Image: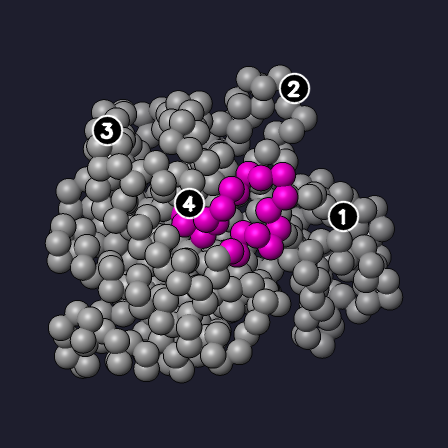
Amino acid sequence: MIITRPRRPQLRLGYEMNAHPARRLSDLRAALDRFTAPVAARVAGDRPFGIVPHIGEGLSRELASPRVRRELRDELAARGLFPFSVNAFPLQDFHARRVKEQVYLPSWAHHRRADLTSRIAEQLADLLPPGEAATISTLGGAYRPTGHTPGRLRRMATNYLRTVVRLVELERRQGVDITLAAEPEPDTTFEVAEDVTSFLEEHLLPTAAKILPGALGIPRSAVPELLRRKFAVNLDVCHAAVMFRDPVEEWRRLEGAGLRVAKLHLTNALSLRRPAEKPEALAELLGYREPRYLHQTVGRRRDGSLWRGADLAALARAGGSLEELEEVRVHFHVPLSRARLGSLRTTRREAAAALEHALRHSDPPHLVIETYTWPYFTRKAGSRSEARQALVDGIVKEFRWVTEEVGL
């Protein structure tokens, strides 16, 4: 939805449609019918409603046809829907029985990630309304356990720049402004702001100075500003909170290095304080283990150092390490409408702080609600129709929390 404020920049607010399967165009249309249209009717009425579809490799194959893109663009316009952002982080089936580490494939160290992302950008360009700027959120490098060497980082820089070149060419050819927004996440190349800023300074800018002038016919002096427009960050509040990072401070670190936050994921993580003292609450937290997604788990010790677990199951094996932890946080995206879930807290305070900072910003990012774990929360809702209604109701509650924070 479009939020208009007196004497302030307009805001774009939507929700990540990776909450719904999107293997094929038929999946996308079903999601629009069953979920997005009912949500839009309740939160936006008859006003235009921005959408944030998930476009991976499968859906992108169907969108390769210009005719299909034209039909989809016209269909969206007739519904009063417009895409202002796309989630191209997961390129494989995000609703497969087991996703886990597969969500990071291919990495930005492989040219296929650049090729697929560039293709998705070209398809998005044909879906955009005239004059609408867009963002594409993507993986921040790679899954760290697969390699974090200087050579691998240089390959990532080269592949990011291949997509940047395509984005500039799209802008020149079609007049569409699309920005690539890399998303920091625990256990990826970009975990925290310093990872992104060091990558920019040590790899991306030096490589860009060699590639972009010849590829785009620009002087070397124009490279930093061009990169700032076309390569940005998608700041996910859940991810920052899991790493015990203040999202507003992360934002300031990024901007201090010349990076924009072009997209803001408003979302909560799970939190439990003093887990060793609360066995029942700990059991409740461990009950969130599930086979589909990775739920990186981080604990903060009394001295401020961090205990790390690659998945929530690691917490069950922590043993005596639990005694050292003041708080543990889990990468499990939970609804913004909830400050507590049973005995557990959420990190909604961090989400509220990030949103408040965005509202004050002279160049606010795209605001996107990103709770993709709704199948987990609606699994006991009853019939299929009851589960669908529970999902719609849940997303509407998230929108209402955000709009109340905005002051609408």
- Whether residue 260 is visible here, answered yes or no, is no
Characterize the local packing of mark 1: few (<14), some (14-19) or many (20 or more) Cα atoms within 10 angstroms.
Answer: some
Name the N-terminal-most of marks 4 and 3: 4
- Whether residue 210 is visible here, answered yes or no, is yes
Was residue 98 drawn as part of the magenta stretch in this picture?
Answer: yes
Residue type for callout 3: Glu
Question: What residue is pinned by disc 3?
Answer: 71
In whole angstroms, how far apart are the C-alphas of marks 3 and 1? 46 Å
Do residues under tags 4 and 3 come within 8 Å of each other at their CB atoms?
Answer: no
Residue type for callout 2: Gly
In whole angstroms, how far apart are the C-alphas of marks 2 and 3? 36 Å
Name the N-terminal-most of marks 2 and 3: 3
Do residues under tags 4 and 2 come within 8 Å of each other at their CB atoms?
Answer: no
Residue positioned 26% across, 32% down in the render: 68
**x, y (%) of residue 200?**
38, 76
Name the N-terminal-most of marks 3 and 1: 3
- Nearer-the-camera pick, 119 or 189: 119
Residue type for callout 4: Glu
167 vs 325, left or right, is left
- Mark 3 or mark 1, which is nearer to you? 3
Element class at badge 4: helix
Name the N-terminal-most of marks 2 and 1: 1
Q: Which mark is residue 286?
A: 1
Name the N-terminal-most of marks 1 and 4: 4
Bounds of the magenta segment: 87-105
Element class at badge 2: loop
Element class at badge 3: helix
**x, y (%) of residue 230?**
27, 63
Question: What residue is pinned by disc 2?
Answer: 382
In whole angstroms, how far apart are the C-alphas of marks 1 and 4? 33 Å
- Mark 1 or mark 4, which is nearer to you? 4
